[in-house]
Amino acid sequence: MTKENTPTIGFIGLGVMGGPMCRNVAGKHDGDVIAFDMADAAFESIADTKASRAASIPELAEQADIVFLSLPGGPQVESVCLGKAGLASANPPPSIIIDLSTTSVASARTTASKLTELGITFVDAPVARTREAAQRGELSIMVGADSDTFAQIKPYLFYMASDVTHGGDIGCGQVLKLTNNALVFENTLALAEMMVVAERAGVAPSTFMEAISKGSGDSFALRNHGMKALLPREFPEKAFPPEYVVKDFSYILDLAEQTGVNSRVAKLAERYYATAAKSGWSGRYFPCVIEIIDQDVDLSE
């Protein structure tokens, strides 16, 4: 530790969300911060902070007491934690690994079990809200951990978040994140459909958004994905694309099956986003699903 009772924090994954999260950690933590990413360009997001750059995962692991992960999904998390040159192979390894990624519940629990056998505490702590919220340090973080571990790590989560919720034991953070994401994706799809209906019936899209935002149809999705993407029909690259939505739906549909729920709404929404990813919108911001509705594209089976 760099100072008495002050841990060194490691951060792996400096992507769209990870970069600004690491930046906030570096700006608010009293101790040392060390970062790793496979892409050289990723370090531009923290270039003017005190965060130092590790040459490898083992190098970071041997210096850090607590390591945050912000990675694409479960396979990457498992590899970084348990792979041949992963965090667990370090001597000594970090004492706590906090995964900010979105993974399946089963993956989180399996990874936690294997790390526990090695004396390493694993926490699933996926994040919600937008890239702008990440930049402001105003994310919502949902945590799966035992009560003592949650109390220990909570102050560090507030470096990145304005809201932190203890969901329960390992895996419960992912349960909350996946159900949250499914609701956002379904809400955005429903909003897009009604926007197309209203426009074809003679109501201008801007008027539709304004009116709905003042009524009971208002929502987070309307004020963010609706106003910022659906209304201008702007779906940039390097945002959250439909193929990421499909990945998250695969996780929630697996969870629904495991809990005995026939999630018909989620299954239908997943088909829309899968069609968007296969119909020229791969890599574009996921509200592009409105184009599938507007163009009446046949849904992929």
Image: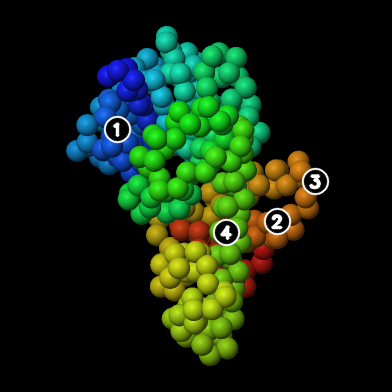
Q: To which residue does mark 4 refer?
A: 185
Q: Is residue 49 left or right of residue 215?
A: left
- Closest to the camera, between mark 1 and mark 2, is 1
Label 4 vs 1, first from the N-terminus: 1
Judge whether residue 158 can be spotted in this image: yes
Mark 1 touches mark 3? (CB < 8 Å): no
Q: CA distance from mark 4 to mark 1?
A: 34 Å
In front of the other: 252 or 244: 252
Label 3 vs 4, first from the N-terminus: 4
- Closest to the camera, between mark 3 and mark 4, is 3
What amino acid is at disc 2?
Answer: Lys
Seen as rendered, the residue at the extreme left is 48
Viewport quadrant of the N terminus? top left
Q: To which residue does mark 3 refer?
A: 260
**SS for tag 1?**
loop
What amino acid is at disc 4?
Answer: Phe
Instruction: Indicate which disc residue 267 carries.
Output: 2
In front of the other: 108 or 283: 108
